[in-house]
Image (cartoon, grey):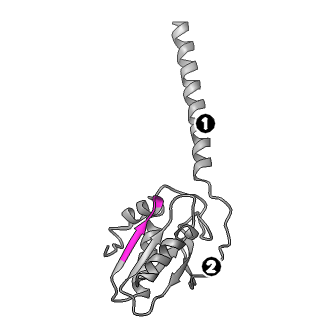
Amino acid sequence: MKLCFSLAIVLVGLGVAGGVFDWHIGTILVARQPRQALAAPGDFSVERVVLDQADAPELVGWVADRKGSCGAIVLLHGRGANRLALVQRAKLLFDAGYSVVLFDLSGHGESGGAVQGFGYSEGPDAARIITFARQRFPGQKLGAIGSSLGAAALVFAARQAPADA
């Protein structure tokens, strides 16, 4: 009986130690890197935009407004990246006739936020960005392209603020 009790104490202790270790690793994985000041690309004309809402992190991005565009495209980056990762794709789409919207999701780049989530917590960011793009480009079709985290955020935003494509 004493052996069973000792074994139970050891197993509970290992479980608690494992839980503390997992919590520590999880905290490291979601911690954001320091905020970065991002310079606009010299060969691509963009306007800096800030979405500021009282109950949500500040979102910072760029808009490349193409006059007479055939629509607008929202581009969202992957986890641990920022909008600079999307500049080449944005140039390609801009040259193809689209206006382009690139934002840093919360916890990334210049945007506010204390953690880098895995898509669910960035869903409201994507909804705000899509809503902004609809207001900025009224009457135009709106597409959205996400890479990794950005794609997950768009999926979670789809019910609240769907894109046309």
Amino acid on which disc 1 is placed: Phe
Quadrant location, the C terminus: bottom left
Q: Which residue is mark 1?
A: 21
Residues at marks 1 and 2 touching, judged by CB atoms closer than 8 Å: no
Looking at the picture, tell me which residue is in the foreground, 4 or 53: 53
Q: Position of residue 23 (x, y in %)?
A: 58, 41
Q: Is the residue 75 above or below the residue 69 in the image?
A: above
Amino acid on which disc 2 is placed: Ala
Give the structural element (helix, strand or loop) at label 2: loop
Q: Residues within 10 Å of mark 1 (few under 14, many from 20)?
A: few
Residue 24: within the magenta? no
Residue in view at x 47 percent, y 59 percent: 149
Q: Is residue 65 visible?
A: yes
Q: Position of residue 39 (x, y in %)?
A: 66, 76
Give the structural element (helix, strand or loop) at label 1: helix
- Which image quadrant for residue 52? bottom right
Q: Nearer the viewer, mark 1 or mark 2?
A: 2
Q: Is residue 159 left or right of residue 89?
A: left
- Which image quadrant for residue 124? bottom left
Looking at the picture, tell me which residue is in the foreground, 16 or 60: 60
Q: Position of residue 60 (x, y in %)?
A: 57, 75
Residue 145: within the magenta? yes
The answer to which of marks 1 and 2 sits earlier in the sequence is 1
Residue in view at x 63 percent, y 81 percent: 42
Residue in view at x 33 percent, y 82 percent: 141
Q: Which residue is mark 2?
A: 40
Read off the magenta span.
Answer: 143-149
User: Whole-Å distance between the Cαs marked 1 and 2?
Assistant: 40 Å
Q: Is the residue 34 above or below the residue 27 in the image?
A: below
Residue 135: which disc? none
Q: Residues within 10 Å of mark 2 (few under 14, many from 20)?
A: some
Q: Is the residue 52 above or below the residue 153 in the image?
A: below
